[in-house]
């Protein structure tokens, strides 16, 4: 907030994302507010609470329309309003093409190397273009000044920066790509690669989580576009417009709001043990995420199977609670994953379990942030086994939840978080033996080592929190705005 006041005074701030931070649904004759399972929302929401402004997002809840005024605005968070939410509406057919189709059957598997074939349909592309234009028009209509700061989020809106720039040439457009950017060869199969790159290069700043994603982007531009790339200055110039391309590793708020009112670690453990009817001395492993094929959930279950086979001393002594929030369930790849995970859990539980012991508890439902933190605090080990992930904020949330410096993090080397959290036990999720060895090591780790590792990771996440992430992007924006002012004198 201070940074905005000092560096970007009197600035109008917008965030644009597909997912809205508060979803209003009808339930039992009431309106219930849900916080979506979304790394993007966990990161951006505290920033908006601190800065104020307008968040433009798709209105996706069953009661969204009941909660907005005539101009489609609602003040959030409910009960302690800090910023405005402007909903953009779309029909089911539009959502099929733009969200399920192009964004999640096309760009999601294209950018995540998880060996799921991307699907590109011309009709999806048409909807994607139309919805991007609708969001661009909504932002332009909301803007009361010619030079707002607009933070465009993610692969749903690759075309938005250019579309906004055409209508608001003086806007500062800060685009953040929350998922990986693949190598040029892999990206090259996209039939609309030029349009997507051109759209993104309407931005003032384009951010990725890691330097290697930035390098992949430079290589992709170099391969497919007529542009000027200055790797020294980390910029690309296309059609006379320059875009800075930089890594900004995203993070979480510190201290996290979900830590407020949390019971002590032993009490959280006792609550979780009582809830699942587990023995008092049980060791607990935890995995929490959206039910997504990029998260390596099946591989993790296989690792549990392998652990109980090769290290039978854990039989009856360890339970793995795998919490999964249903997501994009209309898509075949997601529905199949859910079926496979249920089947595999049953198989493993039959193989290693008994009347009274189930080694894996598969819990398929949405959990609110305070429930997630309670589970993290109850766990001995948290496993993040993404096959490919932009950052993965679950890893950082687990670390943030452990103010007792307990618990061990097992983390995939293919998650962006692994380049920051080197004190985790780093694994290759494709190597099942390696993963189960790491789980065994985590469960057997001496307390002093566990504390030291957790202490170092907590120091890192506390310092590199999401305010710093947003601050760094806004500082770069402020510098570029000042530079532009000087250029305007010439
Ligand atoms: O962080 C990547 C991301 O795709 C976000 O864009 C999104 O909010 C989140 O994962 C969850 O996905 P969805 O919004 O499709 O449920």
Image (cartoon, grey):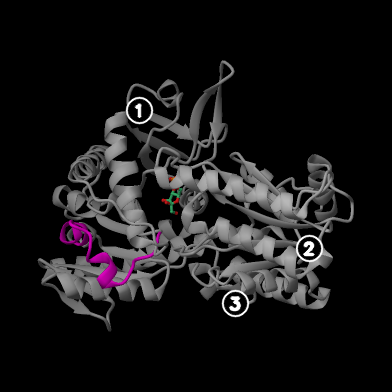
Q: Where, by quadrant of the figure, is residue 84 drawn?
A: top left
Question: In this image, 452 relative to 154: left or right?
Answer: right
Residue 257 placed where, x, y %?
A: 63, 49
Judge: label 1 CB < 8 Å from ligand 1: no
Within the magenta stretch, is there residue 20?
no
- Using a 10 Å C-alpha cutoff, classify the residue at mark 1 as few (fewer than 14 neighbours), some (14 to 19) or many (20 or more): some
Q: Are marks 2 and 3 in contact (CB under 8 Å)?
A: no
- Using a 10 Å C-alpha cutoff, classify the residue at mark 2 as few (fewer than 14 neighbours), some (14 to 19) or many (20 or more): few
- What is the spatial separation of the Cα atoms under label 2 and label 3, in whole angstroms? 20 Å
In this view, the residue in front, 356 or 134, is 356
Residue drawn at x 26%, y 74% as measured from the top left: 218
Total numbered labels placed on residues in the image: 3
Residue drawn at x 72%, y 61% as measured from the top left: 402
The C terminus lies in which quarter of the figure?
A: bottom left
Element marked by disc 3: loop
Q: Which mark is residue 422?
A: 3
Residue behind mark 2: 404
In this view, the residue in front, 156 or 437, is 437
């Amino acid at each position: 907030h201070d940074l905005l006041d000092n560096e970007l005074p009197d600035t109008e701030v917008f965030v644009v994302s597909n997912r809205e931070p508060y979803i209003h649904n009808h339930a039992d004759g009431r309106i219930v507010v849900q916080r979506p399972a979304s790394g993007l929302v966990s990161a951006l929401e505290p920033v908006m609470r601190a800065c104020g402004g307008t968040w433009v997002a798709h209105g996706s809840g069953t009661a969204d329309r009941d909660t907005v005024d005539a101009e489609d605005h609602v003040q959030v968070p409910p009960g302690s309003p800090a910023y405005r939410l402007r909903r953009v509406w779309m029909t089911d057919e539009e959502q099929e093409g733009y969200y399920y189709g192009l964004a999640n059957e096309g760009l999601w598997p294209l950018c995540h190397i998880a060996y799921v074939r991307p699907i590109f349909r011309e009709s999806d592309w048409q909807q994607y273009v139309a919805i991007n234009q609708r969001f661009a028009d909504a932002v332009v209509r909301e803007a009361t000044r010619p030079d707002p700061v607009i933070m465009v989020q993610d692969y749903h809106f690759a075309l938005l920066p250019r579309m906004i720039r055409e209508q608001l040439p003086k806007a500062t457009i800060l685009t953040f790509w929350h998922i990986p950017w693949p190598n040029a060869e892999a990206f090259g199969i996209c039939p609309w690669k030029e349009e997507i790159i051109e759209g993104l290069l309407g931005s003032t700043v384009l951010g990725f989580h890691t330097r290697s994603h930035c390098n992949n982007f430079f290589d992709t531009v170099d391969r497919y576009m007529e542009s000027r790339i200055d790797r020294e200055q980390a910029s690309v110039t296309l059609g006379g417009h320059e875009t800075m391309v930089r890594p900004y590793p995203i993070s979480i708020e510190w201290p996290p709001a979900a830590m407020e009112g949390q019971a002590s670690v032993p009490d959280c453990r006792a609550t979780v043990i009582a809830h699942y009817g587990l023995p008092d001395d049980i060791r607990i492993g935890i995995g929490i995420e959206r039910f997504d094929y990029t998260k390596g959930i099946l591989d993790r279950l296989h690792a549990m199977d392998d652990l109980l086979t090769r290290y039978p001393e854990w039989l009856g002594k360890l339970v793995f609670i795998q919490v999964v929030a249903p997501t994009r369930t209309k898509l075949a790849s997601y529905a199949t994953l859910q079926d496979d995970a249920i089947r595999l859990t049953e198989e493993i539980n039959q193989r290693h379990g008994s009347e009274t012991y189930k080694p894996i508890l598969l819990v398929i439902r949405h959990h609110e942030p305070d429930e997630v933190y309670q589970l993290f605090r109850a766990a001995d080990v948290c496993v993040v086994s993404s096959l490919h992930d932009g950052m993965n904020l679950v890893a950082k949330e687990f670390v943030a939840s452990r103010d007792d410096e307990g618990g061990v993090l097992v983390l995939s080397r293919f998650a962006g978080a692994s380049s920051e959290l080197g004190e985790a036990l780093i694994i290759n999720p494709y190597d099942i033996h390696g993963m189960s060895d790491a789980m065994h090591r985590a469960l057997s780790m001496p307390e002093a080592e566990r504390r030291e590792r957790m202490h170092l990771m907590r120091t890192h996440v506390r310092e590199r929190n999401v305010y710093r992430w947003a601050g760094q992007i806004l500082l770069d924006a402020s510098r570029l705005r000042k530079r532009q002012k000087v250029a305007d004198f010439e």
